[in-house]
Image (cartoon, rainbow, N blue to C red):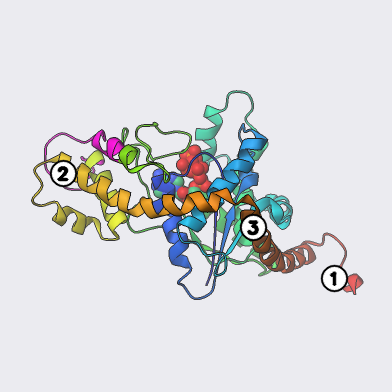
Amino acid sequence: MRIFSGIQPTGRKHLGNFIGAIVQYVAGQEQEGESIYCVVDLHATTVAYEPGVLRERLYDTTAILIAAGLDPERSILFRQSDVREHSELAWLLSSVTSWGDLNRMHQFKDKAGAQRDLVSAGLFTYPVLMAADVLAYRATTVPVGDDQRQHIELMRDIAARFNARYGDVLVVPEGVYPEVGARIMDLQEPTRKMSTTGGTEEGTVYVLDEPKAIEKKFKRAVTDSGSEIRAGADKPGVTNLLEILAAARGTSVADAETSMAGARGYGDLKGATAEAVVELLTPVRERYEALRADEGELERILGRGAEKASAITADVLTDVRAVMGVGCPPAARR
Ligand code: AQP
């Protein structure tokens, strides 16, 4: 098994990113094989951004990952733009990507609508770069949240089309989604996912929020009519709280429901969920401060990760170039 996943250095990382992705990254280190994680700064340039702020966010995100338990000695952790093969492979894969498929991507439609000045071609071809990120490692397994399903399916189609046209060079990877908490919803609008750009400030719990802020956000969480604490399509607010409670405690939603059997109302559910989330995030926030303060060390970690990552992608790209007939022929290189 070779695990690969990427995370954007945009905004502040929230509980959805944490439960949907980061917890899975840390668990991936226990699997046999390699785990490779990448902070995808090139993806972050596809919407309006400040270059100086991007660098800060990259360090923030790297420090959060390490604080959450990602061990750079056991995993490969690096910055996307440091490994040039990601960009090269994205271009090469664009010739086996259907324009019609890209045009169906929900994320593009959502994000394009939110741009004020420019809807960039990069935003449109974002899924091709994402495919290149994974396929450049012949990764087998991609841990992501539920919102990435469509991109993962496209990535699989791209890999399969490439192999059909040029021979079996790439691995068709599988997406892996958490059983609990694959789509954490905004606490104020529980029918919309918790999101960096599309959510409400009050309904978004950040990994680095202080306990008081977390408690306040849960206290004000929007719930549903009635008073029964159970998951169901007619109860999006309560279901979201139960999912968060279960994910934070590492149990099933059914167990979370059972644990609330003696509750006096939604207030108890909100209190229990806030407590579990504070317990989950406090150690991360405490470790984060020291890690974030040492940018030199973060650069050293990312640099070492990029060296290890490049050793893998160089071989894959040599094979891709050879079968596509681009660049110096392998025989002439000797
Ligand atoms: N609400 C969510 N529930 C579960 N998983 C989620 N992820 C994102 N939102 C949720 C997962 O987090 C990982 C990193 O996502 P990203 O790199 O796209 O980071 P981001 O852009 O900061 O995350 P958002 O909130 O998804 O941003 P918007 O909404 O602005 O695009 C991915 O594995 C993702 O599935």
Q: Nearer the viewer, residue 165 or 226?
A: 226
Q: CA distance from mark 2 to mark 3?
A: 43 Å
Q: Residues within 10 Å of mark 3 (few under 14, many from 20)?
A: many
Q: Is residue 217 visible?
A: yes
Q: Residue at x 57, y 69 (%)?
A: 73
**Residue 306 tag number:** none
The residue beneath circle 1 is 330
Between the C-alphas of marks 2 and 1, the distance is 66 Å
Give the left or right position of residue 46, taking residue 257 as reference: right
Residue found at x 64% / y 42%? 55
In the rendered image, the quadrant that contains the C terminus is bottom right
Label 2 packing within 10 angstroms: few (<14), some (14-19), many (20+): some
On screen, residue 67 versus residue 76, left or right, reads left
Q: Magenta: predominant secondary structure element?
A: loop
The stretch of residues the image draws in magenta is: 215-236
Secondary structure of the residue carrying numbered label 1: helix
| Tag 3 residue | 302
Which residue sits at x=62%, y=50%?
Answer: 295
